Image (cartoon, rainbow, N blue to C red):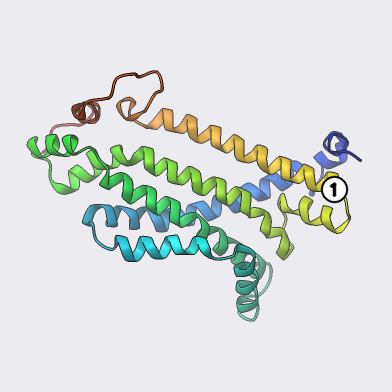
Amino acid sequence: MTLLDWLADPANWTGATGIPAQVGYHLLYTAISLGIACAIAIPLGILIGFTGRGETLVAGSANALRALPTLGLLVLLFLVLAPVIAGRLVFVVPTIVVLVLLAVPPILTGTYTGIQSADPAAVDAALGMGYTRSQILWRVQMPCALPLLLSGLRGATLQVVSTATVAAYLGLQGLGRFIIDGRAQADFAQMAGGALVVAVLALALELLFALLGRTVVSPGLRRSPQRRRRPRPTDTATSVLRTLPAAR
């Protein structure tokens, strides 16, 4: 059986173990992991970017997590949690923890870097309008940080989507099942099909984030290849402050 034969087989597109169902499981793991990672990384990134403190300790520790071997950490967490957690959660919790640890660093880095990289001209203009520090954070620095924040979230999403296949090592469903089961059965078409579906899913999410960026990011903060001239420092300030109400 070739890859095209496997993709064209109707049996692979129906039932609880078909491609649509496995994509659903895969997206579920991804959504849960990213939700938890955002709840941790974004507030922490805002705190670091706003105060300028803890960057070396917190961000350095978070980035060090990238060096941990994903599969080894997954097995270790399973062995540690197995005597404590019963039922299916003993398989789900280690998987989610591993994916969260993978997603936190890029989101954290994108958040505090975006805040710290806010255009000084926009910050100075807001100060001149009487904005407080908290108003500057939420009405100036956060809008300016959106491109880098979304970039970090996009990178985290792609890493989690491509790594969520490890859930199959603990017997969970997901696109990793095609790769693990295909290897066990020496079914290389199934392995290639699973890998292809993961790649297509990652590409679809990449395009979704590109569309999201064009929707939520201020036009003045977008970098278009058609723009030949170098933007002046006041351009960003003007694009952000045009949408701001007067300080109260």
Which residue is rendered at x = 84% and y = 44% of the image? Answer: 189
Q: Taking 180 as reference, is 135 above or below it?
A: above
Front residue (pair 38, 63): 63
Mark 1 surroundings within 10 Å by alpha-carbon count, few (fewer than 14), some (14 through 19), many (20 or more): some
Secondary structure beneath label 1: helix
Amino acid at pointer 1: Phe
Compared to residue 139, the image places residue 66 above or below, namely: below
Residue that carries the numbered disc 1 in the rendered image: 188
In front: 21, or 101?
101
How far across and down, in percent of the image, does residue 49 sit? 27, 52
Q: Quadrant of residue 80?
A: bottom right
Q: Residue at x 66, y 37 (%)?
A: 200
Residue 137: percent from the left, percent from the top? 22, 45
Quadrant where the N terminus sits is: top right
Q: Is residue 218 left or right of residue 194?
A: left
Residue for point 59% across, 65% down: 69
Vertical order, 95 against 141 (above or below): below
The quadrant the C terminus occupies is top left
Q: Judge from the rendering whether residue 212 lies leftward or rightward of residue 178; answer left or right.
A: left
Q: Say whether residue 201 is visible.
A: yes
Q: Which percent across, then down, holds residue 237? A: 20, 31
Residue 205 locus on image (x, y percent)? 57, 38
Furthest toward the right, the residue is 1
Q: Quadrant of residue 247?
A: top left
Quadrant in which residue 15 is drawn: top right
Q: In this figure, what is the number of numbered marks?
A: 1
Q: Is residue 18 visible?
A: no
Q: Is residue 85 left or right of residue 64?
A: right
Picture residue at 67% right of the left edge, 50% below the top: 25
